[in-house]
Amino acid sequence: MGDLYALDFDGVLCDSCGESSLSAVKAAKVRWPDLFEGVDSALEEWIVDQMHIVRPVVETGYENLLLVRLLLETKIPSIRKSSVAEGLTVDGILESWAKFKPVIMEAWDEDRDALVDLFGKVRDDWINKDLTTWIGANRFYPGVSDALKFASSKIYIVTTKQGRFAEALLREIAGVIIPSERIYGLGSGPKVEVLKLLQDKPEHQGLTLQ
């Protein structure tokens, strides 16, 4: 008998809020360049600050782009294309994001897959151009690196983050190599189904999923 660990990544192992917020602003500028004309660095910094507060509502990375635009629309009425932004506060986002998301997706005529691809591409570009800065925008929580390095049980990562980014951060910051086949990232299916898949593997019979 033994244990089998299936760990989430963002918010459990790694504090990636800074990186995801900055990547979202970069991606939003690419997606909606006209909306960002005249947006100065002070407003961008305000958006990034607010993103730290609303981060708990994010289930999948592309939602960060939607939040960036929504926050921008709350500050600049002239660019609003959705009634959601009118009078909206950060608390309102925290309380009603699940209800707002489909409304703004439709109002902005956005496609989930296109946003996912763009968010990944912007991250790839940042990594290729300046790996050090990208890495520096992330941090692992205290004790995580040692816990992963010295774990006696088999560890899997189950995350809505694209797997290649989780793998890179584990390697570059934590100094841990987890094989890609043990990282179930975005596109692997619902987490509940992935956990069931892991439990059902013949080599895991008799192990307790943690």
Image: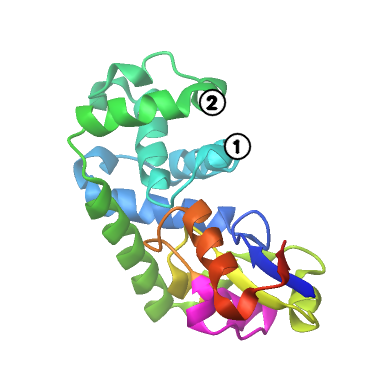
Q: Work out whether 203 lies above or below 3.
A: below
Circles 1 and 2: CB distance less than 8 Å? yes
Vertical arrangement, residue 68 with respect to residue 31, above or below: above
Q: Mark 1 points at which residue?
A: 53
Q: In which quarter of the image is the C terminus?
A: bottom right
Q: Please tell me which residue is depicted at 59% across the width and 82% down the height of the picture.
A: 178
- Give 175 or 134, whichever is nearer the viewer: 175
Badge 2 amino acid: Val
Question: At label 1, which amino acid type do we have?
Answer: Ile
**Could one spot residue 41 in this view of the protein?**
yes
Q: Which of 24 and 165 is in front in this view?
A: 165
Q: Give the range drawn in magenta.
A: 169-183
**Alpha-carbon neighbours of circle 1 within 10 Å: few (<14), some, or many (≥20)?**
some
Please tell me whether residue 181 belongs to the stretch shown in magenta. Answer: yes
Residue 148: percent from the left, percent from the top? 74, 77
| SS state under label 1 | helix
Q: How far apart in space, not on screen, are marks 1 and 2 (Cα)?
A: 8 Å
Q: How many marks?
A: 2
* Nearer to me, 14 or 8: 8
From this view, report whether residue 55 is shown above or below residue 169.
above
Q: Residue furthest top?
A: 87
Q: Position of residue 12 (x, y in %)?
A: 68, 57
Left or right? Give the position of 128 relative to 37: right
